[in-house]
Image (cartoon, rainbow, N blue to C red):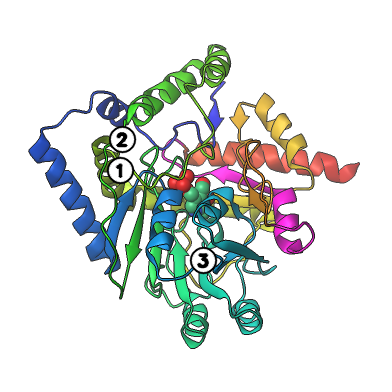
Amino acid sequence: MNHIFNSLGSNYSFSRALRALFFCASTAQKQKNRELLLSTLEQRFHATPFLAINGRSALAQYLTNTHFKKGSKVLVQAFTCYALEQAIVEVGFIPVYLDIDEKTRNPSPSDIQRHLSSDEEIAFVLLQHTGGHPAHIRQIHEICQKHHVILIEDLAQAFGALDEEIVPVGTYADVILLSFGRDKIIDAVTGGAILVKHTSYQVAPNHNTNPLFARWYPIITWCIRMCYPIGVGKILHKIFQKTGALHSPIDEPVDRVHQLSDLNVSLVLDALEEHAPLSAHRKQMYLEYQKSLEKYSAFSKNKGVPSHLRYSILVEDPTQIISYLEKKGIHISDRWYRKPVDGGSIFSSQWYQTGTCKTAEHLAQHVLNLPTHRYISIDDVRYISKEILQWMHSHAKK
Ligand SMILES: Cc1ncc(COP(=O)(O)O)c(C=O)c1O
């Protein structure tokens, strides 16, 4: 049986996995790579980039470098990753959660306006373009300007997306947050960056970090995936998890001391180079899902262009369908997000109050993400869609 995964290193080709494993470069080459990455990001976003070991550390570094005092508030959408709260709380700021809109699955401009009008302590709006689907970002930018609030756009899932006016996401931001973590659009195993427009910013820390995990993760996951058809993959996966060789992507620190490793820099450059052809591939897979699963789509069509990171559908009970698909060789238990502020089984939000963001809660209970990555073919999409429809129909009859 062909085995299909949502994640488990599915963003890396075998040659990339080998390059990571045997990465070695001269000091001059490492410096050249770093400068190339910084200039590529700067040219793309017209902002000054700073690299960090992950997205949350980049955000924490930025927030501490602003003139805002501790206790300042950051308006964050619910249906998000706990990593953002982790960074905000680490530096003594407060996350304030707002719900997403039922139609766009992003915070609505009017809701943001309402929050900013009623709470003057909100200094930042942090928006993430849910699942890579652009929000009404120009309007949100205008509201932020009116209230003198800093707009941070988190492009971890939305890198490369275009808004409804076909303007690239990040264009209206004061600050752009990138994560190069596992299964993001630009996947370098770990890593992050913050790009700041308009204001000056102190130099980020420059202590080296050990890239051991980034060196091994692509090849370990490649071996696991390859061994699934012979029945050993599952066992290997369990062993690597139990021994700590593989850990959850959420289980990362906020680290304001170390900088992005040279290996990660090189992996980010690889991912940026592959971004255009892989985006085209993702789009093709996404449109193929759309042909048969549109009725169940979690996102309605709009004028913009999403990043096509995954195709999201709504199902009554994700756990049931996940175990059904598991038996068919489709491993998609890795859902975004399972809670309004998802910290996996490790963290739970201290600031989100149950019942306050009902749309985010509903989406978290019902969303199922389907893969579009490089190893998915049109035939895989058809197979996944067929199995999902079969399950849906058999359950509709009951
Ligand atoms: C939308 C989004 N932004 C940022 C992050 C933080 O990323 P990192 O793991 O690089 O800190 C996450 C976490 O997965 C995320 O889902």
Q: Secondary structure at mark 3?
A: strand
Q: Amino acid at mark 1?
A: Leu
Query: In the picture shown, does residue 93 fall above or below 272?
Result: below
Residue at mark 3: 126
Distance of label 2 from label 1 (alpha carbons): 7 Å
Residue neighbourhood size for the residue with mark 2, other residues' Cα within 10 Å, grouped as few (<14), some (14–19), many (≥20): some
Residue at mark 1: 260
Q: Position of residue 1 (x, y in %)?
A: 57, 20
Dot 2 and dot 1 residues touching (CB under 8 Å): yes
Tell me the magenta residue range: 352-375
> Which of label 2 and label 1 is nearer to you?
2
Can you name the residue that lies furthest to the bottom here?
146
Q: Amino acid at mark 2?
A: Thr
Q: Secondary structure at mark 1?
A: loop
Tell me the residue at 34%/32% (across/down).
13
Q: Nearer the viewer, residue 204 or 314?
A: 204
Q: Is residue 58 left or right of residue 146?
A: left
* Between discs 3 and 2, the one toward the N terminus: 3
Q: Is residue 357 magenta?
A: yes
Q: Amino acid at mark 3?
A: Leu
Residue neighbourhood size for the residue with mark 1, other residues' Cα within 10 Å, grouped as few (<14), some (14–19), many (≥20): many
Q: Position of residue 337 (x, y in %)?
A: 63, 48
User: Which of the 4 image quarters holds residue 105?
Assistant: bottom right
Residue at mark 2: 209
Distance of label 3 from label 2 (alpha carbons): 28 Å
Q: Position of residue 15 (x, y in %)?
A: 28, 28
* Between discs 2 and 1, the one toward the N terminus: 2
Q: Is residue 60 visible?
A: yes
Query: In the picture shown, does residue 212 fall above or below 305?
Result: above
* Between discs 3 and 1, the one toward the N terminus: 3
